[in-house]
Image: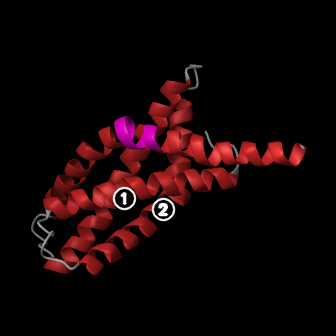
Amino acid sequence: MPTTKKESLQFGLMMCFGMVLVMTMYNFYLNGMFGEMTFIEGIVDLITGFIVAFILDWFIVGPIAKKVALKLTANTNNKLYTVLAISTCMVIGMAFFMSIYGFIMSNLNSGFDYNSIVTDYLSVFGRNFILALPLQIIIMGPVVRYLFTKYIKSNKNEFRNLEEI
């Protein structure tokens, strides 16, 4: 989809924002935070989560996920397999790291329980992964690809056509 670094940045920002928005609301619901925090606290958590997620996506998870996915799909010409492989690898990596982030933030707010860190983390990761994978593959991926193609790619093509005149 994206063909330039600028387009990759735009696509990544769109995808990251959509995923972080839904996953933040999901985690607020799971942790009973609706009604417990102010609107401003929720927005600050959303923005902080978005910044952390985008940094992870752009610098760590994205490059690794793409390398792994392209190796897994090297013997196929089917773009759908490549897209699904990249999406799945991205979800695994992002759920892993963002669950650590969420686990730490949650425990900073409510206090650490050192008796079950691994079990608690695995529970957080499992709950996040179980929503993030279908969200990415069925909803967010197609929606962001559509919006990106319609508004970012089409604007670029329209601009090129104006330059040729």
Q: Residue at x 50, y 54 (%)?
A: 14
Residue, disc 2: 54
Q: Is residue 49 above or below residue 17?
A: below
Q: Nearer the viewer, residue 154 or 126?
A: 154
> How is the model colour-coded?
secondary structure
Q: Is residue 7 above or below residue 88?
A: below
Relative image position of residue 106 (x, y in whole percent): 21, 71
Q: Which-is-in-front pick, marks 2 and 1?
A: 1
Residue type for callout 2: Phe
Quadrant of the image containing the C terminus: top right
Residue type for callout 1: Val
Relative image position of residue 20 (x, y in whole percent): 36, 58
Magenta highlight range? 136-143
Q: Residue at x 26, y 71 (%)?
A: 104
How many numbered circles does the render carry?
Answer: 2
- Residue 86 part of the magenta segment: no
Relative image position of residue 35 (x, y in whole percent): 12, 73
Give the mark, 2 or 1, whose residue is nearer the N terminus: 1
> Under tag 2, what secondary structure?
helix
> What separation in Å lies between label 2 and label 1 (alpha carbons)?
9 Å
Residue, disc 1: 20
Q: Residue at x 56, y 33 (%)?
A: 70
